[in-house]
Amino acid sequence: MTKSELIQRISDMNPHLYQRDVERIVSTIFDEIGEALADGKRVELRGFGAFSVKDRDSRVGRNPRTGDTVYVDAKRTPFFKTGKQLRERLNGAD
Amino acid sequence: MSNDTVTRADLSEAVYQEVGLSRNESATLVESVLDEISDALVRGEPVKISSFGSFAVRQKGQRVGRNPKTGEEVPILPRKVLVFRASHVLKNRINKAFKAARQAS
């Protein structure tokens, strides 16, 4: 399922809404999650999962092909942990 | 704490502010979006949200685990796990903010 298919599904479920409003709603949700993560916040959606960020220290890495050492700057990466309910549903316990 | 954690209520509020729907309907729509994503994943379908990231279900085989307390070997049954891969757009957005904050301090 892609974002546009998701928008289509939500539109079909809500015939009273304009499709462009559904587009804005779906985009707002993902934008808001992205903004929270950019602010270093955590997004906790019970039953679904939690988005958070992890800080990685700078390190000296190696180009695996050439063996050259390269400096890798400190960075912050997004992380997702599946919620309990969704994890159970994926494994057939509904 | 509440300031550092975004929940469904915050997402509904953002939808409410963005589109002229009632608070109640905004909350229902947030729930529908999460439900549709979950249902697709439970069907085994990957979900790709452009400029955000993708969710996919991965099948894990059985392996031998160990109870860390007793040292006893226990089988970990085959199971399905959900993996999220953030898009480059999202990674860059997070990193840019992180670097700007580090430079300012």
Image (spheres, coloured by chain):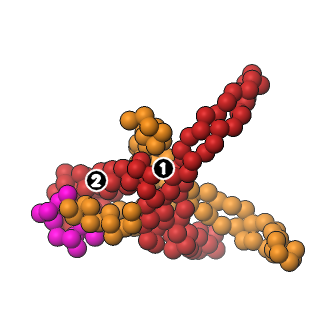
Chain colours: A orange, B red
| Crowdedness near tag 2: few (<14), some (14–19) or many (≥20) residues, C-alpha within 10 Å | some
Task: Report which residue position mark 1 lands on.
Answer: A50
Tell me if B92 is positioned left or right of A63 in this view.
left
Instruction: Indicate which disc residue B24 carries.
Output: none
SS for dot 2:
helix
Q: Residue furthest left?
A: A16
Kindly identify the amino acid type of the residue bearing the numbered disc 2. Ser
The question of residue B25 being in magenta is answered with no
Tell me if A74 is positioned left or right of B40 in this view.
right
Snapshot quadrant of residue A89 = top left
Residue at 54% x, 46% y: name it.
B81
How far apart marks 1 and 2 lie (CA) works out to: 17 Å
Kindly identify the amino acid type of the residue bearing the numbered disc 1. Ala
Q: Chain of mark 2?
A: B
Compared with B73, B80 (above or below) is: below
Task: Report which residue position mark 2 lands on.
Answer: B32
Q: Nearer the viewer, residue B99 or B8?
A: B8
Tell me if B14 is positioned left or right of A38 in this view.
left
* Quarter of the figure that contains the C terminus of chain B: bottom right
Residue at 24% x, 51% y: name it.
B28
Instruction: From the image, state whether disc 1 or disc 2 is nearer to you.
Output: 2
| Crowdedness near tag 1: few (<14), some (14–19) or many (≥20) residues, C-alpha within 10 Å | some
Which residues are drawn in magenta? Answer: A13-23
Q: Chain of mark 1?
A: A
Residues at badges 1 and 2 in contact (C-beta under 8 Å)? no
